[in-house]
Image (tube, rainbow, N blue to C red):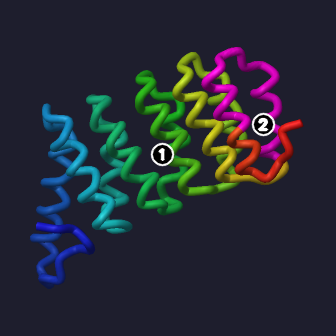
Amino acid sequence: MTYNTLPETGDDSQDEQELHTLIARLADPDKTVRAEAMRGLVMIGKPAVPACIRAMQDDEWRVRYRAAEALGLIGDERAYAPLVAALSDKKDHVRYMAAKGLGLIGDPRAIAHLRIAQRDENEFVRRSAAASLGKIGGVEAVAALRSALEDENTRGVREVILAALHDAGADEG
């Protein structure tokens, strides 16, 4: 079944079962199945947000990773707090996706949290945080990016910071 929207069956229990099935598939051993489940949740959209937020508490990091991805792509403001919390996840993949999701949501309140993520031990988390700051933009985001650029030694991360500064409308000089 293609998930452009929730099926118009008038049967809430069927809709709930389909949502439950997609959430369960986030834990599938097959990476492709997990990715398809995430895309299905995104196609459902806002009705999938509460289930994705609950999935952010799963013991399995792969479930949290895909749930964070879905939340960011759906772009609902209810995802803000769970994604901020996920910036402290023990698994770097989840932190990376949480930072990315916050940029997709675009809430300026995330700037302070993304600034902290710019000091993450994992360079991909730092890259994602920089790109998200660039998407959010504004004076605070530019200041956070400039500060991160001063402290960053990894070439690839520096390149992302420079691109994010450009995206945010700042001159890199």
Where does label 2 land, which residue? 144
Real-space Cα distance between discs 1 and 2?
22 Å
Residue 14 occupies quadrant: bottom left
Rendered view: 52 above or below 143: below
Amino acid type of the residue tagged 2 in the rendering: Ala
Tell me the magenta residue range: 140-162
Q: Position of residue 104 (x, y in %)?
A: 54, 54
- Measuring 42% from the left and 60% from the top, which residue is drawn there? 74
Q: In front: 37, or 12?
A: 37
Q: State which quarter of the image contains the N terminus.
A: bottom left
Give the SS element for disc 2: helix
Residue 65 occupies quadrant: top left
- Measuring 21% from the left and 68% from the top, which residue is drawn there? 3
Query: Label 1: how many residues lie within 10 Å, few (<14), some (14-19) or many (20+)?
Result: some
Q: Position of residue 58 (x, y in %)?
A: 29, 36
* Mark toward the start of the polypeptide (1 vs 2): 1
Q: Residue furthest right?
A: 173
154 within the magenta span:
yes
Amino acid type of the residue tagged 1 in the rendering: Pro
Tag 1–tag 2 contact (CB < 8 Å): no
Q: Position of residue 29 (x, y in %)?
A: 13, 32
